[in-house]
Image (cartoon, grey):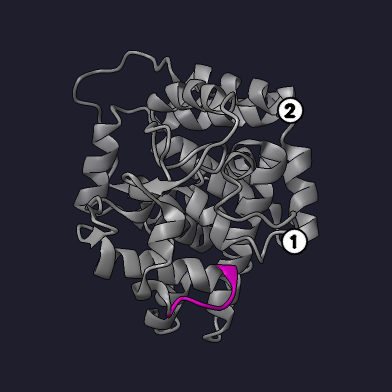
Amino acid sequence: MRAAYTVVLFTIFAIMAHPLTVSAQPQVPSKYGKHALPQATQERLRATRGEVPLKLKRTIRVLKSDRLIPKIKRTAAAYGIDPIHIVGAIVGEHAFNYDIRDDLQQVALQFGRRMRTVEFSCGSVPLETVLAQPQFAQCKGSSNSYWTCVDKVWFTKVRGRVVDGVRMPRRNLTEACFNPFSTGQTYGLGQLSPVTALKMMDTTKLPKLSYKDADKLYERIIDPDESISVIAAVIVDSIKAYRSVGVDISNRPGITATLYNLGDPWTRARRSNGNPKVNYYGAFVEDHIDVLYDLLD
């Protein structure tokens, strides 16, 4: 485990953990620039107690102070994408989805890595035993195809049912089978899950890992040197998904940010009718695009 990325993450967690005091009923805009915000989005912003603008400033400060921008640019070049896509994904996660619990996540993970072995399991049943069940026999192909299939089969045919004499948890795949420390489902700069890292295994330019490499898998989604590569792979996958239906989103960071937030870009591409739209997360990126490009200068 490299000390550098531990320092980076503790810096981020520390500054996120101490929001400024704001009024109990903060004013929430009905728009981000030209984008009208649905009522549900306004309620989400209200629930953050006005912290989004503050988190944006803090995130930019951390990206600058910890010299992550050069890494983002190098990674983007290696994956053939504009670095604005990576910046948009990271800023969106830190502006909207970071939780003070993440500070505890890092402590738990550091403790967990002192263990000689960490294994994924669904309740008390090893993940290997679960994946050997006949329901998953249909899951084949690339890492993305396989784990997307596993995710869907788990949700529709396995969760809450009995496997190997044990009733499976009714939670989603990540929370039920990829959460050995019980500290959350996503981690690091990109708030990545182990399942996302596994889906992107054939797309990243990193050494291959499997679900049996739990320690290394967690290192991958926490270490900025590796997690930025996974973020880039997620964006590349989204661009490919929409290109398959004749839509080019390689110059639309608001759309790639939206897909980073929502996931499942191949299904969304098929259902888009050639007209992808931004959600609140993507709208935030689009309406702060000048600030984000300034960060890359």
Q: Determine whether the residue tagged by mark 2 lies in a helix, strand or loop.
A: loop
The region drawn magenta spans 138-143
- Please state which amino acid type lies under the numbered disc 1: Tyr
Q: In the rendered structure, which disc, 1 or 2, sits on the residue that comes first in sequence?
A: 2
Q: Is residue 278 visible?
A: no
Placement of 246 over or under 261, stated as above or below: below
What residue is shown at x 38% (from left), y 14% (from top)?
Answer: 20
Placement of 233 over or under 216, stated as above or below: below
- Residue 86, horizontal then vertical, whole percent: 62, 50
- Residue 283, horizontal then vertical, whole percent: 43, 54
What residue is shown at x 56% (from left), y 23% (from top)?
Answer: 110
Q: Is residue 250 visible?
A: yes
Q: Quadrant of residue 274?
A: bottom left
- How many residues crowd mark 1 within 10 Å: few (<14), some (14–19), many (20+)? some
Quarter of the figure that contains the N terminus = top right
Res 57 label: none
The answer to which of 52 and 12 lies nearer the viewer is 12
Of badges 1 and 2, nearer the viewer stands 2
140 in magenta: yes
The answer to which of 129 and 32 lies nearer the viewer is 129
176 in magenta: no
Type of secondary structure dominating the magenta stretch? loop
Residue carrying label 1: 79
- Residue 93, horizontal then vertical, whole percent: 47, 42
